[in-house]
């Protein structure tokens, strides 16, 4: 079985003044189809750096990342952008919605990077699944906090990406809304896809299939 994500021996160093600081040290992570993994750790432990490497937004100083069997790291920016657009959905705690587009158009834009892209019917069904079919023509600024979170999830899942990378996806919602998002994450994750959740939330970590602890850039 081909892993959805395979990150092997990741190292990442930064310069701080005249000192070299290790953000990640020999971090490996593999996700098989259907898996949901939570990455937890204190602030400054390397969680955001790890997500950037997995998404191809940054390259490791050592090690490599493969997504859906395709090399992500150490490729040209264009190759990384195409692979990210086709295979990865990104969900953050802040809104990634384009304000001048309505909710449905935001889903259509995200899905246009997939191959093949989703049909309008598939997008409407996705909005139905997250409880936003009646808000498909709404502008992002008119959505409530919970609606925004669910719209962001729908955008991230538009076109059924192989890998979903979620950075503190429930940080700005209530406890009830957090539980709803977790249920939707589990229900809507493609059967052949996988999810990485970076979180400080105990509820989110408990909802995952397994938990990876990062401390000082190392897996504990």
Image (tube, rainbow, N blue to C red):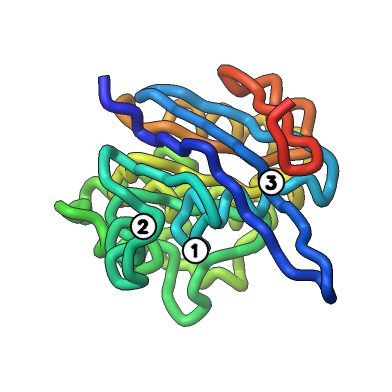
Circle 2 residue = 84
- Provide the secondary structure element on which disc 2 rests: helix
Residue 2 picture quarter: top left
Question: Where does residue 148 sit, x and y in percent of width and height?
Answer: 60, 57
What residue do we see at 72% from left, 52% from top? Answer: 23
Q: Is residue 134 visible?
A: no
Q: Secondary structure at mark 3?
A: helix
Quarter of the C terminus within the rendering: top right
The CA distance from mark 2 to mark 1 is: 9 Å
The residue that appears at 38% across and 60% down in the rendered structure is 74
Dot 2, how many residues are within 10 Å of its Cα: few (below 14), some (14-19), or many (20+)?
many
Q: Which residue is mark 1?
A: 57
Percent position of residue 82, x then y: 28, 63
Q: Residue furthest bottom?
A: 100
Q: Looking at the image, do the residues carrying marks 2 and 1 touch, with CB atoms under 8 Å apart?
A: yes
7 shown above or below 101: above
Q: Secondary structure at mark 1?
A: loop
Q: Position of residue 154 (x, y in %)?
A: 44, 49
Asked if residue 104 shows in the view, the reply is yes
Which sits earlier in the primary sequence, circle 3 or circle 2?
A: 3
Of callouts 2 and 1, which one flags the residue occurring earlier in the amino acid sequence?
A: 1
Residue 165 in the image: state x and y as whole percent: 51, 46
Q: Is residue 203 left or right of residue 51?
A: right
Left or right of residue 131: residue 208: right
Q: Quadrant of the N terminus?
A: top left
In the figure, 129 relative to 110: above or below? above
Mark before the other along the chain sequence, 3 or 1: 3
- Residue occupying image coordinates x 73% and y 35%: 214
User: In the drawing, what numbered circle is on residue 194?
Assistant: none
- Residue at the disc numbered 3: 47
Q: Nearer the viewer, residue 24 or 107?
A: 24
| Residue drawn where x is 32% and y is 25% of the image | 191
């Amino acid at each position: 079985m081909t892993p959805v994500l395979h990150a092997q021996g990741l190292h990442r160093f930064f310069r701080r003044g005249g000192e070299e600081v290790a953000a990640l040290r020999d971090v490996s992570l593999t996700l098989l189809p259907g898996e949901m993994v939570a990455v937890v750790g204190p602030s400054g432990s390397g969680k955001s750096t790890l997500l950037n490497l997995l998404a191809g937004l940054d390259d490791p100083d050592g090690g490599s990342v493969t997504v859906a069997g395709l090399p992500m790291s150490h490729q040209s920016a264009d190759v990384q952008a195409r692979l990210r657009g086709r295979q990865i959905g990104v969900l953050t705690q802040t809104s990634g919605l384009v304000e001048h587009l309505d909710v449905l158009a935001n889903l259509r834009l995200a899905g246009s990077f997939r191959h093949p892209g989703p049909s309008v019917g598939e997008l409407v069904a996705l909005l139905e699944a997250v409880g936003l079919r009646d808000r498909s023509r709404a502008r992002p600024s008119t959505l409530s906090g919970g609606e925004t979170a669910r719209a962001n999830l729908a955008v991230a899942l538009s076109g059924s990406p192989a890998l979903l990378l979620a950075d503190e996806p429930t940080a700005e919602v209530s406890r009830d809304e957090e539980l709803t998002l977790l249920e939707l994450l589990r229900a809507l994750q493609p059967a052949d896809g996988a999810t990485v959740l970076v979180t400080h939330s105990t509820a989110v970590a408990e909802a995952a299939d397994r938990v990876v602890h990062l401390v000082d850039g190392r897996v504990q």
